[in-house]
Amino acid sequence: MPEAAITGTDTPGSTPTNVPDKPALEGLETKLTQRWDSEGTYRFNPETTRGEVYSIDTPPPTASGSLHVGHMFSYTQADLLARYQRMTGKNVFYPMGWDDNGLPTERRVQNYYGVRCDPAIPYNDAYRPPAQPAKNQRDFDVVSRRNFIELCEELAVEDEKVFENLFKTLGLSVDWDMTYRTIDDASRGVAQRAFLKNFAAGDAYLAEAPTLWDVTFRTAVAQAELEDREVPGAYYRYAFTTHDGDPVHIETTRPELLAACAALVAHPDDERYQHLFGTKVTSPLFGVEVEVRAHPLAKPDKGSGVAMVCTFGDLTDVTWWRELQLPTRAIIGRDGRLAGEAPEWITSEDGRAAYARIAGKTAFSAKEAVVEMLSERGLLDGEPKKILHPVNFYEKGDKPLEVVTSRQWYIRNGGRDEHRRATFLARGRELEWHPAFMHSRYDNWVGGLNGDWLVSRQRFFGVPIPVWYALDTEGNPDYENPIVPDDSALPVDPVAETAPGFDESQRGVPGGFTGDPDVLDTWATSSLTPQIVGRWSRDDAFFANVFPFDLRPQAHEIIRTWLFSTVVRGEELHGTVPWKHAAISGWVLDPDRKKMSKSKGNVVVPTDILEEFGADAVRYWAASAKLGADTAFEVAQMKIGRRLAIKILNASKFVLGLGATAETVLTDGTDPVLVNPLDRALLAQLSGVVEQAGEAFAAYDPARALQLTEAFFWQFTDDYVELIKDRAYGAQGEEQKASVLAALATTLDAILRLFAPVLPFATDEVWSWWRTGSVHRAAWPAPVRVADGDRGMLPVVGQALSGIRKAKSEAKVKQRTEVLTAVVAAPAELLSKLEAGLGDLRAAANARTIELRDGAGELTVSEVELAPAEG
């Protein structure tokens, strides 16, 4: 391990001289954050080897808007693991990134500045947004693509400063010298290089195919970005007509697509329609002949049992179109409106006249018009049946998605390749999942893929797709042979830069070239966070020391997007999984057990709770939850955490005030200074806690480690410290005092280390009172072996003391009131423990005589006789 990684470890300090009179949590975040920055407490040492490193592929939050309490929850859980690994001697590589490209940033910039982008507008190098942005989008300034991108970068940088300050206040042990952005030159270069390697290997390809399309944002949407929402609708029933004039009724929620019908489909075993398979029927209104086909996806018990296949109403239509090789009859464009001219397959005058009534309308208005025409002609069979049904939405969109035919770039992900799918499933099994059940979510997603990963987006602020296309003599692009840049030229912007072998005067003219106008999906860049932060293709030695990473911490809802897409890139670029462990955090729920989200209006502003309770208290709440568990936002839990942090300050002040020093910390529990059995019992119990807490952390269960440490800490303060005050003050001689001070110092030293990952501010504050360096560069505590220490002794003696105290409380006397006699009865196996601690018990209870009796069952305290009250 490089020496810089463990500075200040176990360095004895002098007798404390800087313990404050009134310890407090207030101000610790600012003071210690500055100290950690100046001392490089969490700095990664690049002069290292892979075996010394523990590398973390940290989630880059979207830098567009504000953080919410869920960020604090999940990032704290990751930080616990980072801090533990650092204390075990690892050189922890823990960077932070900002995911600042893509639609969220665009939307924030549009609304913040009151602008919208039009790529056709020329760049204005003097442009500044209005001081008072317009509230209505129709009144927004229209700016060039380059101006728009500059505004995106400007606002993202300001947002990132706010985010960094909040994360520092929370106490994340990130190396802030190693931040990155997903839109800077380095990230764009990595993303484009990876894409071109995918293309060269045949893993990325360009195809014209049915594409899920958001009409509001005018962009393609990938399967992983879908969200089903229940919306009101209706079934409309009307008939196609056979050559014999017989009706064939269908029921559909999308009558506006009647003009796009390519076939009718029924289940091959449905006897009602078997005589029609292979024949043709004619559509109402538009008079177009379509074939009746058989397919097992048709549902006999749904509607009339026969479905109208349109290109394209939904993803099932896409499946039927592909597998039955149906004609493409698209009528809805990228703007969500129907084509302005009647399509070629509508040939009758009556049909073309009917189409003229819906031409250019939105899908909603076209539906109204088609239903009106069907009603006018008496073609509707009955009243529409109102329903609630799930409809595909873009997760960030407000209108239902359409399926349009468009030319897009894809990366192969196993959605159309069983062998590749099997490879990705196998990679999922190589990962160690924490908790283990999250693995099933990965398998379910990969197993349910129905297409490759669509990575091109029709947006502005993103990583440009690094290809150009030659234009033929008629100005048509040669999509079959994209022109790619030299690796040394990356990153490039094909819209602004000239294709290799051409000059700018040839842009957009026959015989010249055109640049691909699209950008990569933001996940296509985020999926490369190990490569971006690991300096892949830029510093091979550095990359080899951190990749494959040790840990990917993230939330469970993006297993299908971020985690899986990173596995895809790791396999296709390196032939390996990108990390060894996946630590999955749950959601933060509101008090009604509903997920917190901005759209629901139930989020909590992080700055408010940090100011009210302090970072350690918030971290305690997050650390108390197990990985993968959805956890309620609980102020009560934060109050407990704050009480714990304050108790650490006050108890530490008391212990150090008794005379415990760094010089009295023991590494060997058999040290002859430990003359008292209760002291040896304490250290034996501590040794067990250290072992179990370390095992819990190593098993990625910091909540269990906290539970063990906290239970021991309260027993230490409530029982042991009360029991040994007499000896600590020297009432039983210097030998007994030395024994208790050694036990106190050793226990305090270990407790601070055990709590350090969870409560970094309180523990490092106390550490500075009596030790040199930082507790966060100290080693994880080692068990103090005590040959004859009885781990069960302190709880038993503490229980007896509690019984006597309870008797005094019930008698309504002060705790210092003398006990003349008391009887403690316990099973034989406990009596020896009580006997060994009887001296401390009498002193703590201020008792003349305590009689120990053999008794069955639980320990009991009885016959307590108190001295008469004075006066």
Image (cartoon, rainbow, N blue to C red):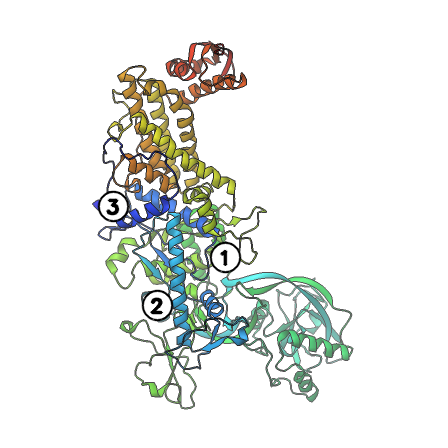
Q: CA distance from mark 1 to mark 3?
A: 40 Å
Q: Nearer the viewer, mark 1 or mark 3?
A: 3
Q: Are marks 1 and 3 in contact (CB under 8 Å)?
A: no
Q: Which residue is mark 3?
A: 5
Q: Which mark is residue 460?
A: none
Q: Circle 2 sits in a helix, a strand or a loop, which is it? A: helix
Q: Is residue 495 visible?
A: yes
Give, as a three-letter code, the residue at label 3.
Answer: Ala
Tags 3 and 2 touching, CB below 8 Å: no
The local secondary structure at tag 1 comes to helix
Quick one: label 2, few (<14), some, or many (20+) residues within 10 Å?
many
Q: Position of residue 570 (x, y in %)?
A: 36, 59
Q: Nearer the viewer, residue 555 or 824?
A: 824
x, y (%) of residue 863?
51, 10
Three-letter amino acid code at the position of disc 2: Arg
Q: Is residue 458 left or right of residue 376?
A: left
Q: Residue at x 43, y 13 (%)?
A: 831
Residue 188: give its label: 2
Look at the picture and state if 45 lies above or below 259: above
User: Tag 1: residue type?
Assistant: Trp
- Quarter of the view holding residue 427: bottom left
